[in-house]
Image (cartoon, grey):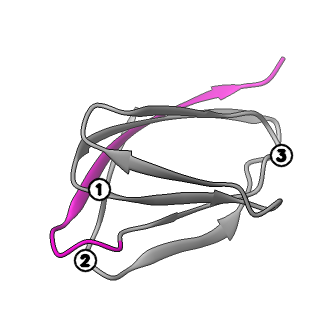
Amino acid sequence: MTYGYLPSGVKWEMHDHINIIEICIVIKGKGIIKDIDGNVEEYKAGDRFIFPSGTKHEIENNSDLESEFYFIRLKEQ
């Protein structure tokens, strides 16, 4: 498990994880998550997202406060 933070107005650009399933747990803040198909979901503290291996996604903090996350990454068998 890893910890990540995203300052206000910053985003992690579109990316994917090959052979890794990523679980994202939002512990603080709010913003949006986008996928390569243009789907957009808002996130807030307590939300969880699962990104299957190879799923391109982007996380953006469009709020005035820092966002914090835990990430669990599972190697795909």
Residue located 71% across and 55% down the image: 39
Q: Which one is nearer the viewer's eye here, 61 or 38? A: 38
Q: Nearer the viewer, mark 2 or mark 1?
A: 1
Is residue 19 shown above or below 37?
above
- At which x and y percent is residue 60? 45, 69
Residue at 46% x, 75% y is: 11
**Nearer mark to the viewer, of 1 and 3:** 1
Q: CA distance from mark 3 to mark 2?
A: 27 Å
Residue at 24% across / 40% down in the picture?
45
Q: Residue furthest top?
A: 77
Image coords of residue 41 (percent x, y): 54, 50
Considering the image in quadrants, where does the N terminus appear?
top left
Q: Secondary structure at mark 2?
A: loop
Residue 18 screen position, x and y as percent: 81, 45
Kind of residue indicated by mark 1: Lys
For label 1, the residue is 30
Residue at x-position 15% and y-position 69%: 65
Residue of label 3 = 54
Residue at the disc numbered 2? 8
Q: Based on the displayed image, in which of its 4 quarters is residue 71 positioned?
A: top left
